[in-house]
Image (cartoon, rainbow, N blue to C red):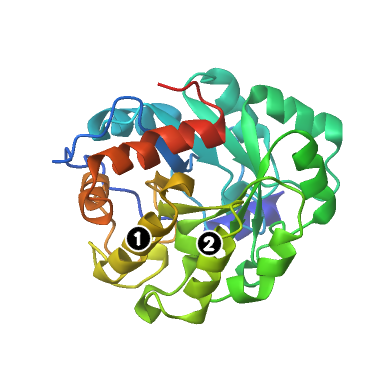
Amino acid sequence: MNEQRNMMVEKPRNQPPVSNPSVPALKLPAGAVDSHMHLFGPAEQYSFSATSRYVSDDMLPETYIAVQQTLGLEKAVLVSGGGYGTDMRHLKDVLSRFPERFRGIALLAETTTMDEMAELDRLGVRGLRFVGPSHGGGLPQISPRMAAIAHELGWHVQFYPHGDEILHVSDQLLALPNAAIVLDHFANVPAAGGIEQPAFRRVLEMLDTGRVWVKLSGPMRCTQEEPPYPSVTPLARKLVDFAPERMVWGTDWPHVNMNGRTMPDDGLLVDLLAEWIPDETMRTQIVRDNARQLYGFDPV
């Protein structure tokens, strides 16, 4: 145990998010959903995985809910980050405490049973997360067995590729039985490559199947630019124009692995929506209605 603690101390500690984000100029629709965020702590209850690439200060539900109130958000999707690996105690505890506010996406070990997943389903988990092979850290990669169990529960598969990995795994993803496949953070394609790059064209081909969704979240994952990440705007506009009915949006709060970079102001991330999705009706569909459908919140 002491050795594990020493390993944790040596890992980089996440730069904290902006503590008082600005109030967005853009007013979000009532019932808006943050479709991608993370929470951590309290540290004395939940230890970071020995394989985690980072550690974090406590990022508690109460802190995040205050951010939600500033931004004009009502619901959120708590995504299992790499920090806790496949340990679901934290996710289960948060969902138990805030059943009306949060839904969950789980990183699960290959040995997880149907009964264990059914318990998560009762708590509000609605998706199973895999990562691309280059992410490392011992996190779950595409598993047909786990996807099949998730399909029985009505869950979707959420996938976080890296770089142009989507070119190499798209067929494997589409071979899964799940009715919906959700790609994290613009499918993480390099924004500098623009909308004609092969990886982005493959994302559009996947959208054409009618099963694939994309999260308009984490623009800082697609580029090393400073905010407001101008090279991401053409990707966002193309995706919104191509399949608005299968887009969702998220903050990616508290923005892990941003050490050495400018931490985004979450209020300004909200304001980017006016540029990415100029049409108000379409914006409401993406920020509220699509997300409530995908994650099983009551419609507004």
Name the secondary structure under disc 2.
loop
* Residue 23 image position (x, y, % from top left): 16, 37
The amino acid marked with disc number 1 is Ala
> Which residue of the protein is positioned furthest toward the left in this rendering?
25
For residue 72, side relative to residue 80 (left or right): left
**Mark whose residue sits in front, 1 or 2:** 1
* Residue 133 image position (x, y, % from top left): 67, 70
Point out which mark residue 62 bears.
none
Work out whether 166 lies above or below 92: below
* Residue 165 image position (x, y, % from top left): 60, 74
Point out which mark residue 11 bears.
2
- Which residue has dot 1 on it? 236
Mark 1 is surrounded, within 10 Å at the Cα level, by few (under 14), some (14 to 19) or many (20 or more) other residues, namely many
Name the secondary structure under disc 1.
helix
Hey, which quadrant is residue 132 in on the image?
bottom right
Q: Look at the image and tell me whether residue 60 can be seen.
A: no
Quadrant containing the C terminus is top left
Q: Earlier in the sequence, mark 1 or mark 2?
A: 2
Residue at image location 45% in from the left, 41% down from the top:
35
Residue at image location 43% in from the left, 75% down from the top:
190
Q: Look at the image and tell me whether residue 210 can be seen.
A: yes
Mark 2 is surrounded, within 10 Å at the Cα level, by few (under 14), some (14 to 19) or many (20 or more) other residues, namely some
Which of the pair 278/91 is nearer the observer? 278
